[in-house]
Amino acid sequence: MATWDETDQGEETCSNSGAVYSVTYKSLPLKDDDSFHCSCGELMRSWRETGMYMYSLVSEGE
Ligand SMILES: [Zn+2]
């Protein structure tokens, strides 16, 4: 089973709601064109590269 490199990107905070996400970057064999929006609807990141960003909620903010 193939595994792809994952890199810890630290945490990012939504400028709108204050929610905190732990971000992991994962290398992919194909180009990924995607984006991530906070649960409040704020665009956190968009990308088009051979990898993807995975966000997991750490804190919902204030
Ligand atoms: Zn938010």
Image: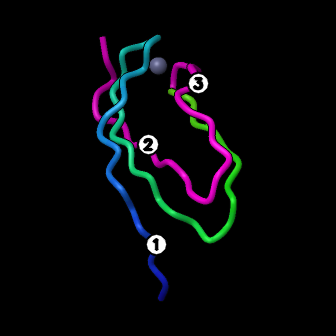
**What is the number of the mark on residue 4?**
1
User: How dense is the environment of label 1, judged by Cα within 10 Å: few (below 14), some, or many (20 and up)?
Assistant: few
> Does 60 appear in magenta?
yes
Spatial separation of the CA atoms under disc 3 and disc 1: 26 Å
Q: Which residues are magenta?
A: 39-62
Label located before the other in sequence (3 or 1): 1
The kind of secondary structure element at disc 3 is strand
Spatial separation of the CA atoms under disc 2 and disc 1: 17 Å
Q: Nearer the viewer, mark 3 or mark 1?
A: 1
Q: Nearer the viewer, mark 2 or mark 1?
A: 1
Spatial separation of the CA atoms under disc 3 and disc 2: 12 Å
Label 2 CB-ligand 1 distance < 8 A: no
Please give the name of the residue rendered at 28% of the width and 28% of the height, measured from the top-left corner.
59
**What is the number of the mark on residue 55?**
2
Please give the name of the residue rendered at 32% of the width and 51% of the height, measured from the top-left corner.
8
In the image: residue 47, left or right of residue 44: right
Q: Residue 46 in the image: state x and y as whole percent.
A: 62, 36
The kind of secondary structure element at disc 2 is strand
- Above or below — where is 31 with respect to 42? below
> Residue most toward the bottom?
1
**What is the number of the mark on residue 43?**
3
In the image: residue 60, left or right of residue 44: left
